[in-house]
Image (cartoon, grey):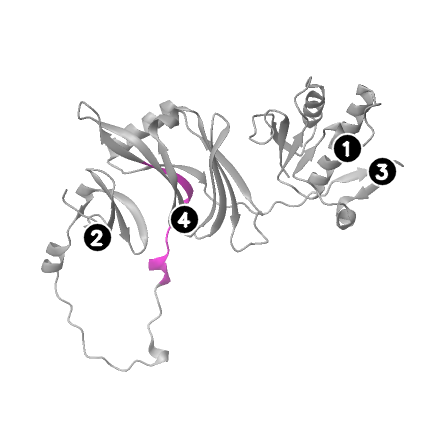
Amino acid sequence: MKYQLGDTILILHSNEEGEVVEIINEKMVMVEVDGVRFPVYMDQIDFPYFKRFTEKQIVIPKKQKVYVDNLKKEDVNKKNKVSSGVWISFLPVFDKDVFDDDVVEKFKIYLSNQTAGTYHFSYDIKFKEIQDFELNNTVLPFNEFYLHDIPFEDMNDSPKFEFDFSLTPVDKKKAPHFETSFKIKAKQLFQKIEEMKFKNEPTFSFLLFDKYPDKMEEIVPEYHNTQGTFYNASRIKEKLEPARSVVDLHIEKLVDNWKGLTNFEILNIQLHEFEKYYHLAVVHRQPNLIIIHGVGTGKLRNEIHEILKTKKEVRTFANQYHSNFGFGATEIFFQY
């Protein structure tokens, strides 16, 4: 092995000096330059001794007094970095098989923030819609954040990468949060690996968003009461009870004496409760809402799904396996 941990190296294409902080495999190392870590191939770096030896020595002139008025202004443009968005990056870690061929053993997953903003993020990954890993943290401007490793064989299980971003500090002109997700298919994965090898690059990436969205103009819904008159939600929002992120529609949770009720009466009570907390979620601008309807015959679930299809505030909804509710809940995602 040519390089060892702690070696000072020179990045050939940028002429910057850094330090080896991790040996990835026989061909790649992780280096750190000015506090930023990134992987490079060994043929893209060298020891800096020849450069130091051949560089002309700089003659430092005798110090002179410099007054505040004569200080040279900093050239800010030289330090400006180009913003290209926020990316999810995959670093394949290679190993040798029995035929001495290079094969991917695992992927190191990074969140790459190539913008001037600082973002708090919630991240989780699902395999076949079952949550496997979650993380909450902050990624700094023009920096990379290591998320976790994924074994190569797990990439065949339809991984879905989900993110929820928010600005730190909060900007009132920007959206309070931004959700995005990404799925990669096996064929697409192999194409990216081959393309990466051809270009002699250490990673491949996918864009999550190029620019954090502005706050959308608030549309205040109007509702009518039993007398048929309309009222504006913004005027009474402070008087409404808080919205819920999870609503349980099991009849024993809603009324005490339910055993004498007919199925029709039970269904009406459950749908009324659903409509109540649906409207509260919209007025309070919730991003999502979980409705627990149980499994049973599927009557309540089907009624709720038919109602959701008519709602313009609904971006999407899904009745999928949840670790807490099984298949007995539907999650609603709103758009405003």
Q: What stretch is highlighted in magenta?
A: 76-91
Labels 3, 1: front one = 1
Which residue is more in the foreground, 192 or 61?
192
Q: Residue 225 carries which label?
A: 3
Quadrant of the rendered image containing residue 232: top right
4 or 3: mark nearer the eye: 3
Query: Sequence-wise, which precedes: disc 3 or disc 1?
Result: 3
Callout 4 amino acid? Ser
Left or right: 112 in relation to 102:
right
Q: In this view, does 329 lie above or below 33?
A: above
Is disc 4 placed on a helix, strand or loop?
loop
Residue drawn at 19 percent across, 79 percent down? 62
Q: Name the N-terminal-most of marks 4 and 3.
A: 4
- What amino acid does circle 3 point to? Asn
Q: Which residue lies furthest to the right in this view?
A: 227
Q: How far apart are marks 3 and 1 (CA)?
A: 22 Å
| CA–CA distance in space, label 4 to label 3 | 50 Å
Mark 1, residues whose alpha carbon is within 10 Å: few (<14), some, or many (≥20)? some
Residue 83: image tag: 4
Q: Is residue 81 magenta?
A: yes
Relative to 10, say whether 268 is above or below.
above
Residues under numbered marks 1 and 2 in contact, where contact means CB atoms less than 8 Å apart: no
Residue placed under numbered mark 2 in the picture: 6
Task: Name the amino acid, label 2.
Answer: Gly
